[in-house]
Image: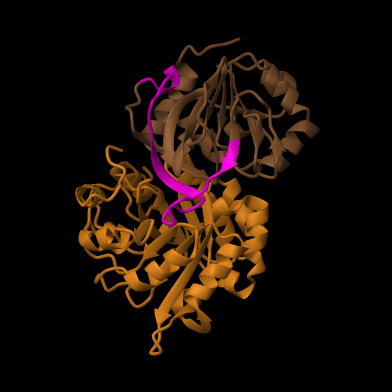
Amino acid sequence: MKLVMIKYNAGNTRSLQYALRRLGVEPLITDDAEEILSADKIIFPGVGEASSAMKYLRSKQLDQVITQVKQPFLGICLGMQLMCTHSDENDTACLGIFESTVKLFKANDPSLKIPQIGWNTIGNLKSNLFNGIAENSHCYFVHSYYAHLGDHTIATTDYCSPYSAALHRDNFYGVQFHPEKSALVGEKIIENFINEDLLCR
Amino acid sequence: MLTKRIIPCLDIKNGRTVKGTNFVDLHDAGDPVELAALYAVQGADELVFLDITATNEKRKTLAELVDRIAQRINIPFTVGGGISSVEDVRLLLDHGADKISINTSAFKSPNLIDQLAAEFGSQCVVLAIDTKQHDDGEWYVYLNGGRVATETRCLDWAIEGVKRGAGEILLTSMDHDGTKSGFAKEITGIVSKHVPVPIIASGGGGEPKHFAEILNGIADAALAASVFHFGEIAIPDLKKYLSEQNIPIRLNC
């Protein structure tokens, strides 16, 4: 299994690397197009700000590499948001893989804090990425922007309003939460991404 | 629904836990990684490691410890204690910390908060505030682990810190810390109402009902140390109790 984690300027990748290692997979962390395109599976992590991340991806032509990928591909947190069409975070055009746009949480109740930080439930699970995961399992979220519900939604979470906790189109998957920080539930989701026979294009 | 968080705090000196524990099943109770792993399995929602090492070797020792924690733990963790620069933070985040907490250094150079938020994002910047109520009824900020008083009101500093980019407030009431008589509901409620970011209440948790009181509409998370370390409160029992009190809690972890 050749698993590549895409290296770019958004956030630390150490926790994810160790989570994969605990599952017996040593990821290759690289921004090299050939390495990415020859991987069996690809993870696109991300913590940070959308516009500077997109700018960096474009400067390295990684935007074109990512949209060409035919193998199972998993975006995490900011990674998932960058796979949508547009983010309101500094009015950023994104990769356009998922037909969702990314908006800032609007709290209609002052007790709802922004960013959302903590464990929330995922429901309406509709993918083999979630095999063995019970409805309303808890995952760890840290984010101020969210992707709305749409045709590509494969898991739903409610904060301020229901939104996409995970998206899927063809070989592309994205999760808003951090599976590498979501205890055994997250571990199982990463294991599914590694082991399940997921779609290729 | 977003759940309330239970956060054990581990004090660290020279890479070891400072206070003892009475977990008989731990191979090495002084090893923060072993204790952290146990808490993670028991259902802790996050962990905080507070480093009180004062030597020059501190940064390296702490970074090595953070790396060992990240290798083992599958829940989020925050590292604090003597962090005073962007470079300190970069080192800890690069070694796998999810968040860092800053206290005295941020008060002395508030611009540090802006710099950290710009460089790494607000989501990893926790502003820790130690506070104490004076005879005039106001709560004031204390520095250097509570040894140095200031004339700044706790609420004013919390509001400024969040404006500058702090993503969470860790609020410790020195009047309640160590008393096991309950968390500081009044000041925690005031700060929580006036800042838009999550509040972690700290100091005074001695019984499960104290956690229920502070998490019921006041704080987003509750932190404690010795009641967990000495087994006075077991995390699974606490979470079951809170759930029975209709507080949203992550069970079945």
Judge whether residue A128 is colored magenta.
yes
Task: Look at chain B in the picture and name its colour.
Answer: orange
A98 relative position to B12: left or right = right
* B202 w.r.t. A4: above or below: below
B18 relative position to B213: left or right = right
Q: Can you give x and y, in whole percent of width and height, for residue B209 in the image? A: 21, 61
Residue at (45%, 21%) from the top-left corner? A129
Task: Look at chain A in the picture and name its colour.
Answer: brown
User: Going by the picture, which residue comes out furthest to the top?
Assistant: A201
Residue A52 placement: quadrant: top right
Q: Tell me which segment is drawn in magenta.
A: A102-131
* B136 w.r.t. B45: above or below: below
Between B73 and A124, the residue placed more toward the observer is A124
Q: Can you give x and y, in whole percent of width and height, for residue B102 in the image? A: 54, 64
B68 relative position to A96: left or right = left
Q: Can you give x and y, in whole percent of width and height, for residue B98 in the image? A: 52, 48
